[in-house]
Amino acid sequence: QVQLVESGGGFVQAGGSLRLSCSCADPGNIFSINNMGWYRQAPGKQRELVARITTSSSTAYADSVKGRFAISRDNAKKMVYLQMNSLKPEDTAVYYCTATSPAGISRGWGQGTQVTVSS
């Protein structure tokens, strides 16, 4: 298991940008062999995958954020980032960082960071 802590959330006007960070406490030194992802959950809605990045840094995005969001990772620092541009009110949600083994086993979730986009 890894311990994940998100930061960088906040309040921003529509069209603005935020950069979320996820730090990983990794006593087993397994960060680099985990796929990482960002999920979000808006009030009254199910948690949804926003973006993911594999151990080889291949990326995938939800259709709703393609072209606006970018996920990246720094294995040396054990960090994952989500750059969010052209934010919309519908991006308002709690954003969670997660780690998953290549076999699809969850390795941990962060506590979440709130992103609020005003119109």
Image: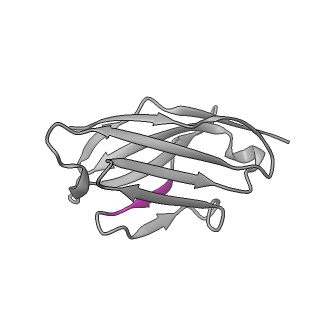
Along the viewing direction, whichever of 23 and 51 lies nearer the viewer: 23
Along the viewing direction, whichever of 48 and 116 lies nearer the viewer: 116
* Residue 52 part of the magenta segment: yes
What colour scheme has been applied to the protein in the rendered image? one colour
Query: Where, quadrant-wise, is the N terminus in this rendering?
Result: top left
| Image-quadrant location for residue 118 | top right
In this rendering, position of residue 50 left or right of residue 103: right
Q: Position of residue 54 (x, y in %)?
A: 33, 63
Against 56, residue 1 (above or below) is above
| Image-quadrant location for residue 68 | bottom right
Q: Position of residue 76 (x, y in %)?
A: 29, 53
* Residue 18 part of the magenta segment: no
Query: Where, quadrant-wise, is the C terminus in this rendering?
Result: top right
Along the viewing direction, whichever of 76 and 104 lies nearer the viewer: 76
Residue positioned 70% across, 50% down in the render: 17
Dominant SS type (magenta): strand
In this rendering, position of residue 119 left or right of residue 68: right
In this rendering, position of residue 63 left or right of residue 88: left
Region of the chain picked out in magenta, as a range: 50-54
Q: Position of residue 16 (x, y in %)?
A: 76, 49
